Amino acid sequence: PLVSNIPGISAYYTDNGSQSITITIEELIVAFELDESKLETNSDPIHLAEFLSIELGINVSIHYVNSQSEMIESIETGEAHIGFLPSSSSLIGWKLHNLSVLGAIQNKDQLTQRYSMALVSNLGELATASSDNESSTDPFAMMQGRVSCFTGSQSPIHTILPIHYLIENEYYSPNQENVEIIETIRGYFGNQSSLLSSSSTPAGEVGAISCLSENVSEIAFVGEDALEENCNQEEQENQDWCMEIDQYLSLGQVGVSPSESVMYNPSTLDSRSRAAILNALVTLNYQMYLENYSRPGFGTYTGCYDISTHKVNSDNNREICGDEILNNILDGTGIVRTNSQEHLGLLSEVVSVVPGAY
């Protein structure tokens, strides 16, 4: 049925202006990192495959890999046509494996970038230094020799950005010889500073906040929303080790990273197919699932609503509606068109400054 002038929905209408482009490959293969906990749930990548199959009119299959490096390899060799990679792995794919960016996933705030923050305890010396208005007590200068937990291999970008910030703001002049990133870290921070591995428990940004919360370190560098997601929910949803939310203090932004990229290999995917795939992915932005949505005189609607055509598709399952796929599978709010230089260029410059970054 046609849906028109529905309050709260029509305001979101935007004509995407995309034209139908016929894909030239017979089957699209999408690489995904295997997470068995998501199989047969609404977060199963198979729902994205079904959506793309409908949009493109061809068979779409999922090629599961066990790591981001395997995903890069699968796209490079042609085992898969596209894959979704975080910023650090996208940069490796671009610079070392000749992959390219097709699009970028918008974060929950609808941006395609995310800030890295320096977190400390509000009871510590660094917190006091940040608010005493004394030039002699610069908290970033005072970090020298202090213990910090870095996100490491699971979220390497929040290891690289803080070091870049210190170098660019002339707090730190690291040894430019061939070194490991942990040596670069300990050249400024305390020797007990740690680089969390993928096997750490907890790992990544969660692990860094845990280090700070349990007094293992004085500083944690994480993404701007990491603290909110782990320690500022309902009490039963917070991590067990969280302090009260007002016991943490942000010293501000120390860098910005691009959001997750849709990557492809230009030598194995022709331009018409790329355009068709990107158009199909962007179509996700224009769909939202309605459940028993009523308006007097127009009836009650349940189904996938396309805001570009004002039509509700009641035949398809909820799991393959655009907003459901974005939220449950791609962990974002939309997909935008971009390219490698536009999306990853600044990060490439940042990495070149930090010894041992890659």
Image: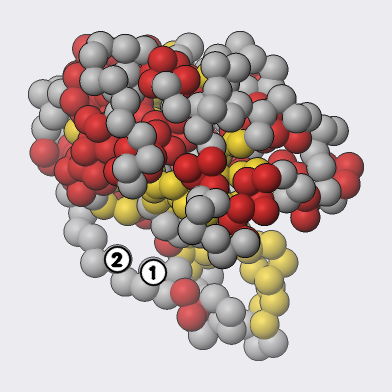
Mark 1 / mark 2, whichever is N-terminal: 2
Could you say which quadrant of the image residue 355 lies in? top left
**Nearer the viewer's eye, disc 1 or disc 2?**
2
Identity of the amino acid at label 2?
Answer: Asn
Q: Which residue is drawn at 69% across and 87% down?
A: 296
Q: Find residue 89 and report its horizontal and vertical position in percent.
A: 35, 26
Q: Find residue 216 and report its horizontal and vertical position in percent.
A: 71, 25
Residue holding disc 1: 308
Q: In this view, does 9 lie to the left or right of 85?
A: right
- Residue furthest to the bottom: 297
- Residue furthest to the front: 136
Q: Is residue 84 visible?
A: no
Q: Find residue 162 and report its horizontal and vertical position in percent.
A: 43, 38
Q: Is residue 233 left or right of residue 31?
A: right
Image marks 1 and 2: residues in contact by CB distance under 8 Å: yes
Label 1, label 2: how far apart the Cα atoms are: 7 Å
Residue holding disc 2: 16
Image position of 135 with respect to 32: above or below:
below
The residue tagged with tag 2: helix, strand or loop?
loop
The residue tagged with tag 1: helix, strand or loop?
loop
Image position of 240 with respect to 77: above or below:
below
Image position of 314 with respect to 301: above or below:
above
Identity of the amino acid at label 1?
Answer: Ser
Q: Which residue is drawn at 25% across and 32% down?
A: 353
